[in-house]
Amino acid sequence: MSDKMIAPDNIKDIIEINTKDSTYNVALLKDSWQCDVSAYSKVLVITNEKIAPLYLELFQTRLITQEVYAHILRDGEEFKTWDSIKQILDSAFKFKLDRKSLMIAVGGGVVSDLVGFASGIYQRGIDFISFPTTLLAQVDASVGGKCGINNEFGKNLIGLFHQPVGVFVWMGFLASLPEREKKAGIAEIIKIAACFDKKFFNDLENMDLKDKDNLTFCIFRAIKIKAKVVMEDEREKGVRAALNYGHTFGHVIELLGNYKEFLHGEAVAIGIRMANSLSLELGKMSRKVKDSIDSLLDKNDLKFSYKVANKEVFYQNFFMDKKVEFGKLRVILLRDIGEFEICSGINKTSFLKALEEWE
Ligand SMILES: NC(=O)c1ccc[n+]([C@@H]2O[C@H](COP(=O)([O-])OP(=O)(O)OC[C@H]3O[C@@H](n4cnc5c(N)ncnc54)[C@H](O)[C@@H]3O)[C@@H](O)[C@H]2O)c1
Ligand SMILES: [Zn+2]
């Protein structure tokens, strides 16, 4: 249905994603976009308290619907919980959404994860579309159908694979996005380029992402790469795991900072540097490659002073990650730009040695 929702003359670029059970489009929208969801019986737009005053009114004029309702969530990662899922489902029941109804996520990764999950279980699953409003959600969270919530045991530990029926990327949202959030999203673009595409990485080295056209181009290029990865490996049995490059370390940084010290993308930027130190330590990556990734992160203001207070504690926290299987850590390491390895069974001494740089 997604190709019919946005008229072709409102689209700048489009990618079709085909997975085992679904086909949908990720479309880069022109400023004049309108979205026709009148084929659905009812529509529930879900956003948060920060985004609603900025954009909810816009959706009233840009959506073509039969019946539309809104649900406003609290803002913040701490609300990516069961309680928010329950509230969304309660609204859906209250407004009598049926199996031919649609949920629309308007927000960053927190909103799109919640809406993906809630729509995936409401009456055993209804359609949802996503309008990602952060750079991170545009390039990463909104594509690929992973959706999850947090609990007291950790992040994203409960969730589903539920693909949207459309993802609509409108650069207009970024006008209100704080610079810090933008930079955090750029870390995920660098991650994608470093893991999968040397040419893209080289282009990023020569590009100023403060330029809006450059940024638009890079966002869509990163989405194209992620789309390809998701199509190859929807359930993360192989290549998709590489998207976790920098994340094994990044998740510990987030956890030890109580999710307050660093934004996700910032923690990933530090995590990428740590993963590269481990690659260097293991003789997989050359100093030259490590330096080139460091320089690209530096160029995009993704340089943070971070101290590992206790290497042992840091190491133990790796085992809270979903990537642990049979008690073994799985880490994505690069040999070169565009060449990654999914490594398990790396000894503890190497991890501790790699962390020395941050002591
Ligand atoms: N499902 C996936 O594949 C996947 C991938 C990556 C990340 N994630 C998840 O995404 C979440 C992080 O996403 P995020 O970085 O977008 O964080 P977020 O959703 O918390 O958004 C960051 C902040 O920006 C605000 N905001 C959003 N859009 C705005 C706009 N246009 N203007 C002004 N403010 C705006 C939000 O209200 C919030 O305060 C994490 O929960 C992470 O686990 C999921
Ligand atoms: Zn990430």
Image (tube, rainbow, N blue to C red):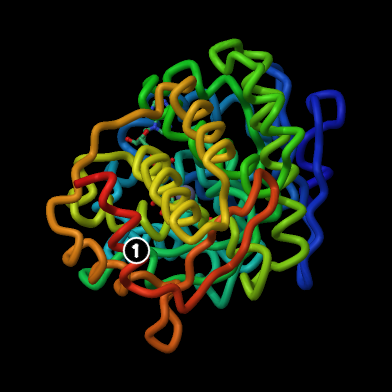
> Would residue 26 appear left or right of 347 to someone viewing this image?
right
> Would residue 303 appear left or right of 345 to someone viewing this image?
left
Q: Quadrant of residue 18?
A: bottom right
**What number of labels is visible?**
1
Please, is residue 282 above or below residue 210 in the view?
A: below
Q: Position of residue 210 (x, y in %)?
A: 54, 13
Q: Position of residue 30 (x, y in %)?
A: 73, 21
Q: Amino acid at mark 1?
A: Phe
Q: Give the labeled residue for mark 1.
A: 351
**Residue in the foreground of this view, choosing between 44 and 23:** 23
- Graded by Cα atoms within 10 Å as few (under 14), some (14 to 19) or many (20 or more), the crowding at tag 1 reads many
Q: Residue furthest left?
A: 309
Say whether residue 246 is visible.
yes
Please, is residue 37 above or below residue 244 in the view?
A: above
> Would residue 164 appear left or right of 108 to someone viewing this image?
right
Picture residue at 24% right of the left edge, 32% below the top: 305
Q: Secondary structure at mark 1?
A: helix
Q: Position of residue 353 (x, y in %)?
A: 31, 59
Picture residue at 75% right of the left edge, 43% below the top: 224
Q: Position of residue 148 (x, y in %)?
A: 43, 64
Picture residue at 42% right of the left edge, 23% below the top: 177
Picture residue at 44% right of the left edge, 24% below the top: 298
Say whether residue 111 is visible.
no
> Would residue 8 appear left or right of 242 to someone viewing this image?
right
